[in-house]
Image (tube, rainbow, N blue to C red):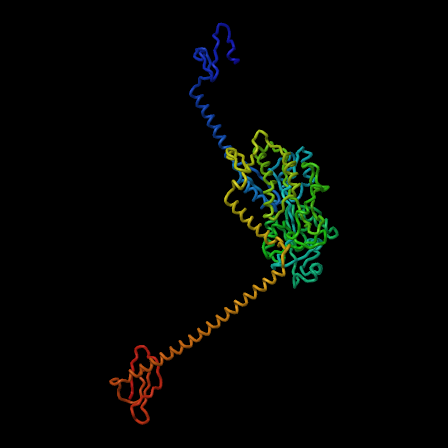
């Protein structure tokens, strides 16, 4: 419009301007500019630009959205399962990766390697909360971190006894003495005493104890438990990610949970600590330690009430008032209760509040967290050896912590399709319920897990005993046994009768064969001595029939033996 009103100097004709898309008579003027007039080159350039933009849009739509995380090796199986399930539910291509590096590395990579604290991953996972030092460093750099609890995890020691079933009772102080080198053999008097005076081995057997060598959240939980429950014998630091007992004789280090579990299954009378779900799945040669809890009861984590330890955590003194504060004081170890398990942790996911620079990954992270925290996903934790979050903790995290995350608001949020929704469900950035969209392998795995859970429930469920008449049941049972015995006696009588008949038949058969053989021999001999078949001479034996002259000199025959003829032989007789 500025060009349309510009005057080019005295005596010069003013150019007219025909705007693009608006056809006017002035567009044909000699002294005119038109937005509808192009050269071939300009038109070709415009077409190419449009094509490039279209191709870029299509490529962007087809590129996978990437989430990367690292941390607890104990949580690796859980993350891999849920990531695979989540990807199968997505309408857009995803690439979600998780490295089971250990809790310490997971925290380091979300924090960043010093100022300005640039994260190397989208999230980190740890079996313990972020340390005060790391949290404070981020706070001082105006970076906020949110702790997202994921599950309730029990831990325990497991022994390769090679015998099943074998119950081994230990106390926290015995375990402290093993890991400090005070108790070195399985026939130690203190181990024998706590097991009712009966040695668990008959000969002196050295103890080999396995432990995590790297920065491990499991090690931190174990060391804090030993500090709390046996401070008089535990000489190493509490809640230490890095073990301090490398120089203790009998110790064997392993890098990850998986390698420690593998070493345990391969070496008899080794002992190692790990997540209970991992240890319980190792096979019949592995015995879970019956550990004495705060109430003085010996039990395994399989027998204990694991969720009970976390039931009051939301109202505990260590729980912060807001999700962005320091969580390092949160613990659910060594809680009271006759059936409460003493070694329980809350694995946390560490995520940054500000995800505006993460692009599509920021929006995807929110959708993934909502999936992990929904009730159906939490219920699936049981099949992986974990327990769901207490309901108040789950709702707190879902309604207060996750909404704090700040993605790039220019991008579209993900849509959760719980029931089939026409048109919308077929769009991009949609997470569809697995009953509607999944893949075959996830479907089969879930079906198997449901079947195992159902069988376990039937096996463990107490029978309904109320109102049962046990006396009548016993009478009916005895009557049934008598009927069965009567039928067995009848069958036994029939069997003996048939045996007698069979024996008689066999005897008659043998007698018949003997008579047949005798008759055959007699016919054969008589036919052999018929007229025309004799020769002179005295006693002879040319075949298998012997003849002898009688003492009186007559021609009577004395048959002394009847034998079968050899193949090709002839009969000679002496008369």
In the image shown, does 132 or 296 lie closer to the viewer? Answer: 296
Residue 473, quarter of picture: bottom right
Instruction: Identify which residue is drawn at 70% across, 61% down.
Output: 196
In the image shown, does 521 or 495 lie closer to the viewer? Answer: 495
Q: Is residue 307 left or right of residue 574?
A: right
Quadrant where the C terminus sits is bottom left
Q: Which residue is the extreme one toward the top?
A: 11
Q: Which residue is the extreme one toward the right?
A: 232
User: In this picture, is 299 found above or below 90?
Assistant: below
Q: Which residue is the extreme one toward the left?
A: 532
Q: Which residue is the extreme one toward the bottom?
A: 552
Q: Is residue 258 left or right of residue 299?
A: left
In the image shown, does 198 or 66 lie closer to the viewer? Answer: 198
Instruction: Identify which residue is drawn at 55% across, 50% down.
Output: 451
Counting every numbered tag in the picture gives: 0
| Residue 112 visible in the picture | no
Image x and y of residue 14, in percent: 48, 9
Image x and y of residue 413, in percent: 57, 33
Image x and y of residue 24, in percent: 45, 13
| Residue 508 visible in the picture | yes
Image x and y of residue 40, in percent: 42, 21
């Amino acid at each position: 419009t500025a060009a349309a009103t510009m005057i080019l100097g005295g005596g010069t004709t003013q150019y007219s301007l025909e705007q693009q898309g608006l056809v006017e008579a002035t567009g044909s003027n000699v002294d005119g500019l038109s937005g509808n007039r192009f050269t071939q080159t300009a038109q070709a350039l415009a077409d190419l630009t449009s094509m490039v933009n279209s191709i870029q849009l299509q490529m962007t739509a087809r590129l996978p959205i990437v989430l990367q995380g690292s941390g607890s090796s104990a949580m690796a199986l859980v993350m891999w399962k849920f990531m695979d399930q989540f990807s199968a539910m997505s309408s857009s291509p995803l690439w979600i990766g998780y490295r089971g590096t250990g809790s310490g590395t997971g925290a380091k990579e979300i924090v960043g390697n010093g100022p300005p604290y640039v994260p190397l991953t989208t999230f980190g996972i740890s079996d313990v909360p972020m340390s005060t030092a790391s949290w404070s460093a981020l706070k001082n750099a105006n970076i906020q971190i949110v702790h997202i609890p994921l599950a309730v995890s029990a831990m325990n020691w497991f022994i390769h006894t090679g015998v099943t079933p074998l119950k081994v009772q230990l106390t926290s102080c015995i375990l402290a003495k093993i890991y400090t080198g005070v108790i070195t053999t399985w026939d130690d008097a203190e181990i024998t005493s706590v097991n009712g005076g009966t040695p668990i081995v008959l000969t002196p057997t050295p103890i080999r104890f396995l432990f995590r060598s790297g920065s491990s959240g499991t090690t931190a939980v174990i060391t804090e438990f030993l500090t709390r429950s046996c401070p008089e014998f535990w000489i190493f630091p509490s809640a230490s990610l890095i073990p301090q007992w490398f120089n203790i004789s009998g110790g064997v280090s392993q890098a990850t949970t998986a390698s420690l579990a593998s070493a345990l299954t391969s070496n008899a009378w080794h002992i190692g600590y790990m997540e209970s779900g991992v240890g319980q799945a190792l096979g019949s040669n592995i015995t879970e330690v019956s550990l004495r809890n705060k109430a003085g009861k010996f039990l395994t984590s399989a027998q204990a009430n694991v969720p009970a330890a976390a039931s009051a955590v939301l109202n505990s003194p260590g729980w912060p008032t807001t999700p962005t504060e320091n969580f390092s004081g949160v613990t659910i170890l060594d809680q009271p209760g006759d059936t409460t398990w003493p070694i329980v942790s809350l694995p946390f996911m560490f995520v940054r509040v500000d995800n505006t620079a993460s692009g599509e990954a920021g929006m995807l992270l929110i959708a993934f967290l909502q999936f992990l925290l929904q009730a159906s996903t939490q219920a699936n934790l049981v099949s992986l050896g974990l327990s769901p979050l207490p309901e108040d903790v789950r709702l707190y995290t879902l309604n207060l912590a996750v909404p704090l995350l700040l993605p790039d608001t220019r991008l579209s949020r993900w849509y959760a399709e719980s029931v089939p929704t026409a048109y919308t469900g077929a769009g991009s950035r949609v997470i569809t319920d697995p009953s509607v969209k999944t893949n075959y392998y996830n479907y089969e795995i879930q079906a198997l897990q449901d079947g195992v859970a159902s069988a376990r429930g039937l096996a463990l469920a107490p029978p309904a005993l109320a109102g049962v008449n046990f006396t009548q049941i016993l009478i009916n049972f005895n009557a049934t046994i008598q009927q069965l015995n009567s039928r067995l006696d009848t069958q036994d009588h029939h069997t003996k009768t048939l045996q007698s008949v069979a024996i008689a038949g066999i005897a008659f058969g043998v007698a018949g064969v003997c008579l047949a053989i005798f008759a055959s021999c007699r016919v054969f001999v008589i036919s052999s001595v018929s007229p025309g078949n004799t020769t002179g001479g005295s006693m002879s034996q040319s075949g298998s029939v012997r003849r002898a002259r009688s003492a009186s000199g007559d021609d009577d025959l004395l048959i002394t033996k009847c034998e079968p003829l050899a193949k090709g032989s002839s009969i000679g007789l002496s008369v």
